Amino acid sequence: MRDLARIAAGAYGAPSAAHVAAAPGTQILLPRVASLVNPGKALVLGPTYAEHARAATIAGHAVKEVEDVEALAGADLAIVVNPNNPDGRVVSRETLLRLAGQMRAKGGLLVVDEAFMDVGPADQSLAGDVGQGGIVVLRSFGKFFGLAGLRLGFALSDTLTVERLETQFGPWAVAGPALEYGIRALADSGWQADMRRRLAEDAAGLDALFGRFGIPVAGGTTLFRYLRFADAPGLFSALGERGILLRHFSDRPQVLRAGLPGSQKEWQRLESALADWHARRDDSAREIAR
């Protein structure tokens, strides 16, 4: 555990190993982090990952989603996903540090979920600022390294907060295999650099493929692309019929999130399915015109 905390601190840019609490996945951290402040008003910058609101509710907070980052100043618990899921929005480090100061002044807490910061702008991370207090940064291991089932995640914060979280988990919080994978993966900076380059190339290729069929890419990260257009429901259904699953959002029917194909065969399947969908749309348009 000490080795993992030390290597994670270096990989993420935390001040030291004492500022890192390892856990069996980020998910299990959410309600525990929300419980670090007394029940009050929790504001979540949205739309975003729904589990933050649910975890804050479990912790006893009255939860509301807001779309303006400045509105978070009125919270006892302010939550920002950065880069955001699913649209890839990034809130600047300067803005977040100002908000953290407002939270700290009244005994509140700013939680910044950096689950996708491995492929985000590293200079906007708050990992190096957690020693100031009033900040918890969450980092997810499984997404970037493709090992979600391993169950490993981290909370970065001031040393007292880290001690509080570790006391809740007790000894042996992280399974031995997860410790070993985490130590080796987080220390392998060469693999990480190669993967970031590959993901950037694949994301650009996916954007180009969508563009060929008139599908606009509105944002995302290099791990997923964010699509927003009128016929999103039709595309979701057409690809689903071919066994290709995109993420849809029941409250935002014109929005889809697409992951990256994992092999040349999958790229070809997607291209073929998009071509069929596009041809059917053209046929429908001609029928309407007649």
Image: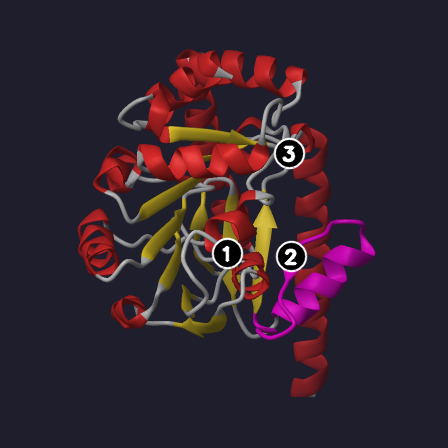
**On the image, numbered disc 1 is attached to which residue?**
86
169 left or right of 189?
A: right
- Estimate the spatial distance between the alpha carbons at disc 3 and disc 2, rounded to whole Å: 17 Å
Which amino acid type is marked by label 1? Pro
Q: Earlier in the sequence, mark 2 or mark 1?
A: 1
76 left or right of 281?
A: left
- The numbered disc on residue 130 is none
Look at the numbered disc 2 and give the secondary structure of its residue: strand
Q: Earlier in the sequence, mark 3 or mark 1?
A: 1
**On the image, numbered disc 3 is attached to which residue?**
148
Question: Which residue occupies the foreground of this view, 261 or 288?
Answer: 261
Local crowd at mark 2 within 10 Å, few (<14), some, or many (≥20)?
few
Question: Which residue occupies the foreground of this view, 230 or 289?
Answer: 230
Q: Which residues are magenta?
A: 232-254
Q: Relative to residue 285, is residue 138 depicted above or below? A: above
- Estimate the spatial distance between the alpha carbons at disc 2 and disc 1, rounded to whole Å: 9 Å
Which amino acid type is marked by label 2? Arg
- The numbered disc on residue 247 is 2
Q: Earlier in the sequence, mark 3 or mark 2?
A: 3
Which amino acid type is marked by label 3? Ala
Question: What residue sits 37% from the left and 44% below the top?
Answer: 136
User: Which callout, 3 or 1, points to the residue nearer the camera?
Assistant: 3
- Provide residue 34's location: percent of width, then percent of height: 47, 55
Question: What residue sits 28% from the left and 38% below the top?
Answer: 130
Visible residue check, residue 129 = yes
Callout 2 touching callout 1 (CB < 8 Å): yes
Look at the numbered disc 3 and give the secondary structure of its residue: helix
Callout 3 touching callout 2 (CB < 8 Å): no
Question: What residue sits 29% from the left and 54% below the top?
Answer: 91
Q: Relative to residue 277, is residue 229 depicted above or below? A: below
Question: What residue sits 48% from the left and 54% below the top?
Answer: 35
- Estimate the spatial distance between the alpha carbons at disc 3 and disc 1, rounded to whole Å: 18 Å
